[in-house]
Image (cartoon, rainbow, N blue to C red):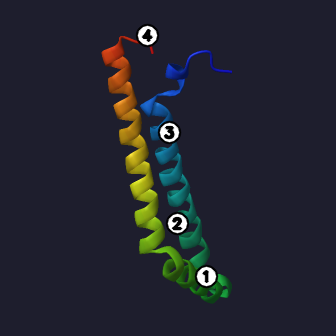
């Protein structure tokens, strides 16, 4: 429970989300690259990767980056307003 709404306005919370997303992406790519080395799974993985790439390559990536960028700058704006107001948070 938050007693003061200023407590929730932190850029580090947003940055943790982005770092987690990048980390999950790196883990996914690493697992896929390891699994591609096995010939039995190679064709199935290639089809799956092509399907994912066609479905969200630019649309999903650009949307995700735009939302993350806007979220960070909204938090920065809140932090600047809190600094101007002299909030302790």
Nearest-to-viewer mark from 2 and 1: 1
In this view, the residue in front, 86 or 15, is 86
Q: 10 Å neighbourhood of mark 2: few (<14), some, or many (≥20)?
A: few
What residue is drawn where x is 50% and y is 78%? 53
Check if mark 4's residue and mark 1's residue have beta carbons within 8 Å: no
Q: Which residue is mark 1?
A: 48
Q: Is residue 40 above or below residue 27?
A: below
Toward the viewer: 75 or 55? 75
Judge the density around disc 1: few (<14), some (14-19), many (≥20) Cα neighbours within 10 Å.
few
Which badge, 2 or 4, comes first in the chain's sequence? 2
Q: Which quadrant is the C terminus positioned in?
A: top left
Dot 2 or dot 1: first in sequence order is 2
Q: Do labels 1 and 3 touch, CB within 8 Å?
A: no
Image position of 78 with respect to 4: above or below:
below
User: Is label 4 in contact with label 3 (beta carbons under 8 Å)?
Assistant: no
- Residue 12 % position (x, y): 45, 32
Residue count near mark 4 (Cα–Cα under 10 Å), binned few <14, some 14–19, many ≥20? few
- Does dot 1 land on a helix, a strand or a loop? helix
- What kind of element bears circle 4? loop
Rounded to the nearest whole Å, what is the CA distance between mark 3 and mark 2? Answer: 20 Å
In the picture, the disc for residue 18 is none
Residue at the (38%, 20%) spot, across then down? 82
Q: Earlier in the sequence, mark 4 or mark 1?
A: 1
State how far apart marks 2 and 1 are (Cα): 13 Å
Q: Nearer the viewer, mark 2 or mark 4?
A: 4
- Disc 4 to disc 3, how far (Cα)? 22 Å
Of the numbered discs in the image, which one, if any, rests on residue 88? 4
On-image quarter of the N terminus? top right
- Local packing at callout 3 (Cα closer than 10 Å; few below 14, some 14-19, many 20+) is few
Sequence-earlier tag: 4 or 3: 3
> What is the C-alpha distance between the residues marked 4 and 1?
50 Å
Q: Which residue is mark 2?
A: 29
């Amino acid at each position: 429970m938050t007693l003061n709404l200023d407590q929730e306005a932190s850029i580090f919370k947003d940055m943790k989300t982005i770092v987690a997303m990048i980390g999950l992406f790196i883990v996914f790519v690493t697992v896929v690259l390891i699994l591609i080395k096995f010939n039995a799974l190679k064709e199935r993985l290639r089809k799956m990767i092509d399907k994912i790439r066609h479905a969200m390559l630019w649309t999903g990536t650009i949307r995700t980056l735009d939302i993350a960028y806007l979220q960070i700058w909204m938090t920065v704006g809140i932090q600047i307003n809190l600094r101007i107001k002299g909030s302790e948070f």
